[in-house]
Image (cartoon, rainbow, N blue to C red):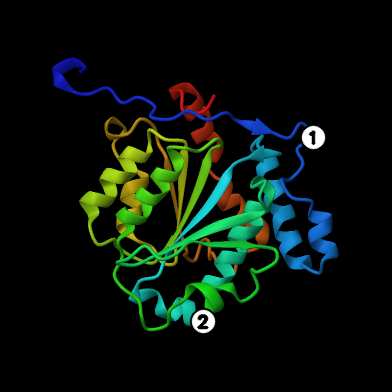
Amino acid sequence: MGLFGKTRLTAAHTVNLHKDPAGAPAVNLTKVRDAGHVDLAKRAEKTGVALGKRGLAGIRAQAQLVLDHSGSMYPDYDSGDVQTLVERALAFALQVNASGTVPVIPFDSRILPTVEVGVGNYAGVVNREIWRGRNMGSTNLAAALRVVMETAAAATVPIFCIVVTDGEPDSRPDTTRIVCELSRYPVFVKFLALKPVAYLAELDDLDASRRLLDNVDSKPSSTDLNLLSCTDLQFADAMVDEWDTWIAAAQKAGIVA
């Protein structure tokens, strides 16, 4: 216990930071391009540019996508917007994930089966394997983030957790609590909101006394940055924004060695 009975926050799990000495992506993008996935390779290359700007070229991590499957997201699934964001998340993962895949964790009031999305199955994957049409529930974001924390407890590299959502979670207190708990693990949370969500901005600016470090960055789709129509480089820049500062803080806190 610290002063006045307050518990001092400490790292719950530590991972090593790995970088390719030459700054190479985790996946050979020439092979991706030669296999006919030209646009995917171009997007991944822009991610490499954005990483390089922040001194993160060649970094290795586990990108995960936590995907809102609540009823309010129906139009975004139906329009193909969710498919677009899954593809953009995969392009990011090709730079950092040695596996060449991004685990997609769909959630609503339930935690739905995780879908491993990679070069071989990304085309049409949302309609084929993720979306359940009208069978969509509420927004139990806290439960989905707890799944991420369970993964982080055994992680060997930092986790880059991408959360795609469009609104408030079922429980603000539960979600805030788990975000604060996650600050003790090697997890950086990037919220991609399909519209401005006041609560996500609040998570981004949580009081420092409640967390071991700042582990959240929220990027709402807006007139300044439309997550669906912005250029690949603009999207990549938004993705890596604040990751370098999180890594520095995580090293100081003993979360990343």
What's under tag 1, amino acid-wise? Ala
Q: Which residue is found at the position 40% from the left and 66% from the top?
A: 112
Give yes or no for contact between labels 1 and 2 (Cβ–Cβ under 8 Å).
no
Which mark is on residue 68? Answer: none
* Quadrant in which residue 171 is drawn: bottom left
Q: Which residue is found at the position 30% from the left and 45% from the top?
A: 178
* Quadrant in which residue 74 is drawn: bottom left
What's under tag 2, amino acid-wise? Ser
Label 1: element kind: loop
> Seen from this angle, which residue lies furthest left?
4
Which mark is on residue 22? Answer: 1
* Residue 53 visible to the viewer: no
Relative height, residue 87 to residue 160 (above, below):
below
Q: Which residue is found at the position 35% from the left and 30% from the top?
A: 212
Q: Which residue is found at the position 39% from the left and 32% from the top?
A: 213
In the rendered image, which quarter contains the N terminus? top left
Relative height, residue 50 to residue 227 (above, below):
above
Q: x%, y% of residue 183?
A: 38, 36
> Seen from this angle, which residue lies furthest top?
3
Q: Nearer the viewer, residue 255 or 243?
A: 255
Q: x%, y% of residue 150?
A: 40, 44
Q: Which residue is mark 2?
A: 79
Side of 141 where 239 appears, left or right:
right
* Quadrant in which residue 83 is drawn: bottom right
In the rendered image, which quarter contains the C terminus? top right
Label 2: element kind: loop
Q: x%, y% of residue 131?
A: 47, 76
